[in-house]
Image (cartoon, rainbow, N blue to C red):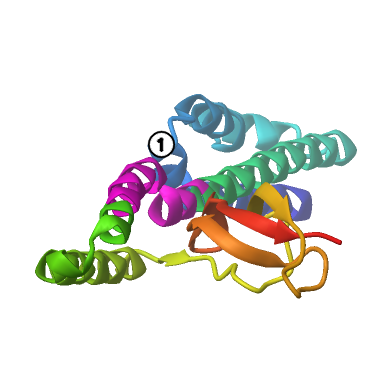
């Protein structure tokens, strides 16, 4: 009776554990995995009777039980890995899903800055209007965790900057950004677009 009770209890324990993951497995379209485990772990009436008949063969039953437990643990470990990957993918979509759209918006910002640079004193009202639009655009970008890379007078960083030219006689140490041709941007902790810069040299 002890062996029979022990095996029945272990099966019931595995049943409870598997049921906890039922909905998650089905949502991830791994129903075949769940159905396989269901078939292996859940005892039908005939299987229960067979266990009772074979209770005298304790070693064989324990070996079968250990085998089923191993299959269950491996499957659940794989489910946990799938869940972690799904969580990571969902987080990436939330953080970086607008990257392509943001790059297109930055092109508009670049054109506005170019227009601002061509405005003379006679077009001060137009320049003020462009500045207001740029300010509002920067606020919207910041709201979505998109920020300008501060490059001017910073040490050149190949991970953040793209050198367009080198210049001497700047009074700066070699390798310092002396001009920003085009602003670079970060989205959260990733590079969205490198800053195009001019760098000092000896």
Residue positioned 32% across, 59% down in the render: 117
Q: Quadrant of residue 130?
A: bottom left
> In the rendered structure, does residue 156 fall within the stretch colored magenta?
no
Residue positioned 25% across, 65% down in the render: 134
Residue positioned 59% across, 70% down in the render: 152
Q: Please provide percent x and percent y for residue 80.
A: 61, 49
Q: How many callouts does the rendering have? A: 1
The one nearer the camera, 66 or 8, is 66
Q: Considering the numbered disc 1 on the image, is that residue within a helix, a strand or a loop? A: helix
Left or right, 85 with reference to 132:
right
**Which quadrant of the rendered structure holds the C terminus?**
bottom right
Q: Please provide percent x and percent y for residue 174.
A: 83, 65
Residue matched to label 1:
26
> In the rendered structure, does residue 97 fall within the stretch colored magenta?
yes
Q: Residues within 10 Å of mark 1 (few under 14, many from 20)?
A: some
The one nearer the camera, 184 or 94, is 184
The one nearer the camera, 86 or 60, is 86
Q: Please provide percent x and percent y for residue 148.
A: 46, 66
Up/down of 58 relative to 120, above or below: above
Up/down of 133 relative to 172, above or below: above
Residue stretch rendered in magenta on the structure:
89-111
Q: Is residue 158 visible?
A: no
Q: Quadrant of residue 37?
A: top right
Residue found at the very far left of the displayed protein: 125
Q: Is residue 174 visible?
A: yes
The kind of secondary structure the magenta stretch mainly shows is: helix
Q: Please provide percent x and percent y for residue 189.
A: 56, 63
Left or right, 91 with reference to 105:
right
The one nearer the camera, 70 or 106, is 106
């Amino acid at each position: 009776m002890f062996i029979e009770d022990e095996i029945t209890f272990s099966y019931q324990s595995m049943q409870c554990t598997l049921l906890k993951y039922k909905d998650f497995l089905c949502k991830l379209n791994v129903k075949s995995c769940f159905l396989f485990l269901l078939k292996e772990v859940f005892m039908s009436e005939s299987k229960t009777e067979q266990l009772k008949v074979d209770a005298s063969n304790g070693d064989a039953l324990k070996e079968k039980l250990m085998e089923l437990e191993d299959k269950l643990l491996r499957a659940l470990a794989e489910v946990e890995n799938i869940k972690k990957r799904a969580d990571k993918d969902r987080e990436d979509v939330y953080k970086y899903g607008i990257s392509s759209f943001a790059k297109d918006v930055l092109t508009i910002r670049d054109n506005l800055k170019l227009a601002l640079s061509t405005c003379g004193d006679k077009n001060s009202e137009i320049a003020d209007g462009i500045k207001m639009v740029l300010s509002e655009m920067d606020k919207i970008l910041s709201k979505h965790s998109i920020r300008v890379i501060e490059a001017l007078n910073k040490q050149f960083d190949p991970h953040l900057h793209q050198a367009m030219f080198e210049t001497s006689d700047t009074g700066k140490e070699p390798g310092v950004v002396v001009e920003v041709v085009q602003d670079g941007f970060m989205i959260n902790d990733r590079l969205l677009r490198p800053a195009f810069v001019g760098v000092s040299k000896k």
